Amino acid sequence: MSSGKTIFLRRGKDESLKRFHPWVFSGAVHHVDGDLDEGDIVDVCNSEGEFLARGHWQIGSIAVRILTFDDEPIDGEFWRSRLAAALAVRRSVGLTGREDSDIYRLVHGEGDNLPGLVIDIYGKTAVVQAHSVGMHVNREAIVQALREVMGDNLCAVYYKSETTLPFKAQLAQENGFLWGECRDNVARENGLSFRIDWLKGQKTGFFVDQRDNRHLLEQYARGRRVLNMFCYTGGFSVYAMRGGAQLVHSVDSSAKAIELVNENMQLNFPNDSRHEAFAEDAFRFLDEMKPMYDLVILDPPAFAKHKDSLKNALRGYTKLNARAMEKMPSGSILFTFSCSQAVSKDQFRLAVFTAAAICRRRVRILHQLHQPADHPVNIYHPEGEYLKGLVLYVE
Ligand code: SAH
C-alpha cells in the first residue's frame, strides 16, 4: 500500500513520530527514494526501513506534515472519514443544526489530524484555506469529500489560499469558488448577524475563534463604557451592545475594518447612537483617550509570528496593556488576548503582570480564556494551543 515515494529518517530521529507528533523537520531526513515534487504524498520510514507514517512533502523546515500513522491510502475514503470525524466533533459540542448560530470551524489543521488545512463554515458556504502545498494539490478531492459529508448543508466552497500557501512554491493561486457560488454572506453567531467578507477579509473572513469569549464579554457589558481595541469586524462590539453597554467605541487602524464594523452594527443595532468607530492606530488612541472606559478589549494581531521575535512581542504586550490599564478607572474590566503561537500562556501572563506592576494597580484574574472547542488541540501537538486571554478586574 506504499505511496510509491519514501523518505528515510536519520538514526534516532523517529522519536517524535513515535509520540505521534505530526511534523518531520528537514534536519531529520537522511535521504529520499524517488523523485519528489512538493506536495507529494510520501511514506516516512526509520533508518531500518520500517514504515512510520504517511504525509505531505514540502520544501522548508517542516519537510513532512503527517496525515496518518497507519498504512492506509490517502484517497477519497481517507478525506471523507477525516472530514466526517471533524464534523462529529462539532456536532458533539453543539455547533451544528442550530437556528441561532451557523458559523463554526470544521477543520482546524493538526487539531483535526489534517495539518495544513483549515475549513470554516459560514451558513451554507465553506471557506477552505490551504497552508501547505500538499493540501493545495489535493484540494479537488477535499472539496468532493466535503460535499459528501455536508450534503444539503452546503451550497458553495470558496478557496482562499492566496496568502497562506508558501510563497516560494510559486503556485500563483487566486481566491475563488471551487464549487457553487453563494452571494448571501450574512451568517449568524449566537443570534447576532455578521457579514462575512470571505472575498477580501483577513483569515477566512471572520475571527471564529473568539465566539465563546465574545459571549462572556456580553455578560460584563451592562451599563459599561466599552473600548474594543483592534476590533476588525466588530464581534466584541456587537455583543457588548446586546449586553446593554452604555456606549461602545471600536478602534482599528484599517479603514476597511471600520467599514465592516459599521456594517455589522447596522445589521444588528441600526442607527443606535451608543456605537462609534474610529480608524486609528491603537497606541495613538490609547495615548490621547480620556480615562473613561471601564470595559476594555485588547485583541491585537499576533505580535510574534516566530520564536525569534518573542522578546519584542512580550515587550509589545506589556506596553499595550500598561497603556490601557493606566487609564482605566477603578473597578474596570479588561479582556486581554494574545493569539501568537510562539507566546506561551505563562509568558503572556508574565507580560500582563509586568504591565499591572508598571501601573501600580491592584489586579485580579477573573477568567483565563482560550480557543473554543471547534479549534481543538491535538494532544500530541501542544503547539496548536495559540489563543490565550485573561479577564482582569482592575481596582
Ligand atoms: N478582535 C477581532 C480580531 C482582531 S484581528 C475579532 O474579534 O474579530 C487584529 C486587528 O488589529 C486587525 O483588524 C488589524 O487591522 C488591527 N490592527 C493591527 N495593527 C493595529 C494598530 N497598530 N492599531 C490598531 N489596529 C491594528
Image: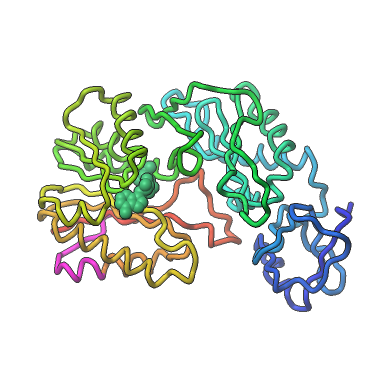
Chain part drawn in magenta:
354-366
At x 23%, y 53%, the residue is 334
Percent across and percent down for residue 23 are 66, 62
Q: Do we see residue 303 in this rendering? A: yes
What colour scheme has been applied to the protein in the rendered image? rainbow
Q: Residue at x 19, y 62 (%)?
A: 363
In the rendered image, residue 300, in percent from the top left (x then y), is placed at 35, 53
Residue 161, quarter of picture: top right
Horizontally, residue 362 falls left or right of residue 52, namely left
Do we see residue 212 in this rendering?
A: no
**x%, y% of residue 127?**
56, 35
Residue 313 to residue 174: above or below: below
The residue nearer to you, when weighing 205 against 346, is 205
| Between 22 and 183, the one nearer to me in the picture | 183
| Coordinates of residue 65 in the picture (x, y in percent) | 69, 57
Residue 115 left/right relative to 300: right
Question: Which quadrant does the C terminus fall into?
Answer: bottom left
